[in-house]
Image: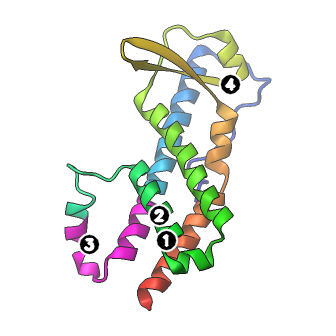
Amino acid sequence: MSKPFGFDLPDNSKELTDKEYVNLVNRIRGNFLSYVSVLDSTLTVIISDLFLRDKNDFPLWAKTVFDEDRTASFGTKIVWISRIMKNHQDFKKAIEEKTRIKIQQKLNEIREIRNDFAHNFAQNKKIEPENVKNRIIKLYDFEEGMTTPKLFKMEEIMDLINDPWILEQLEKIEVLTKKIREN
């Protein structure tokens, strides 16, 4: 499922122009945010499937729990799915505790990067040669009148996108949720 979002980075030996670097940074950010949208939607489906007894209630559910005024954030959905896995007997039986914890940790790691990518800005006017050479994404967090740089290695972001583990786990949870609903 991550294939549409992942791509091969240019070889480290290839020298990028400033424009190529900026385009690459923007593509990685865009692809990562799109990838997280898929994870977010998957969590919405799992949570909705678990709690909705009648599929005809989905529009009402979406307009109350997941409406645009009180949208459950990606972080909130992570908390909900973690609590469901921890407290629902079928999830506790089917998914060992270490895996449940790892799912939550991986989703939170992705959430933190997602927030940085979505809410921080890149300074594209002055490209730093070491960032281009080392394939570093430099974002600036502007909070309380201070600007703080944050660095991300392109390769690490692409590794997150290309790692199928979290998507496989969410798929297993989705299948388990459907089984629970059928009983």
Which label belongs to residue 30?
Answer: none
The answer to whether 84 is drawn above or below residue 19 in the figure is: below
> Magenta residues?
41-61
Q: For the view shown, which residue lies furthest in the front direction?
A: 87
Label 4 element class:
loop
Q: For the view shown, which residue lies furthest in the right direction?
A: 13
Amino acid residing under circle 4: Arg
Label 1 element class:
helix
Its colouring scheme is rainbow
Give the alpha-carbon distance from disc 1 to disc 2, as whole Å. Answer: 6 Å
Predominant SS along the magenta part: helix
Give the alpha-carbon distance from disc 3 to disc 1, as whole Å. Answer: 24 Å
Give the alpha-carbon distance from disc 3 to disc 4, as whole Å. Answer: 44 Å
Which label belongs to residue 135?
Answer: 4
Residue at image position (68%, 24%) is 135
Whether residues under marks 1 and 2 lie with C-beta atoms below 8 angstroms apart, the answer is yes
Which label belongs to residue 83?
Answer: 2
Residue at image position (48%, 33%) is 117
Give the alpha-carbon distance from disc 4 to disc 1, as whole Å. Answer: 42 Å
Label 3 element class:
helix
Q: In which quarter of the image is the C terminus?
A: bottom left
Whether residues under marks 4 and 1 lie with C-beta atoms below 8 angstroms apart, the answer is no
Instruction: Bin the neighbour count of mark 3 within 10 Å (Cα to Cα): few under 14, some 14-19, many 20 and up.
Output: some
Amino acid residing under circle 3: Phe
Instruction: Bin the neighbour count of mark 4 within 10 Å (Cα to Cα): few under 14, some 14-19, many 20 and up.
Output: many
Residue 132 in magenta?
Answer: no
Amino acid residing under circle 2: Arg
The location of residue 16, given as percent across then percent down, is: 67, 19
Q: Mark 1 points at which residue?
A: 87
N-term mark: 4 or 2: 2
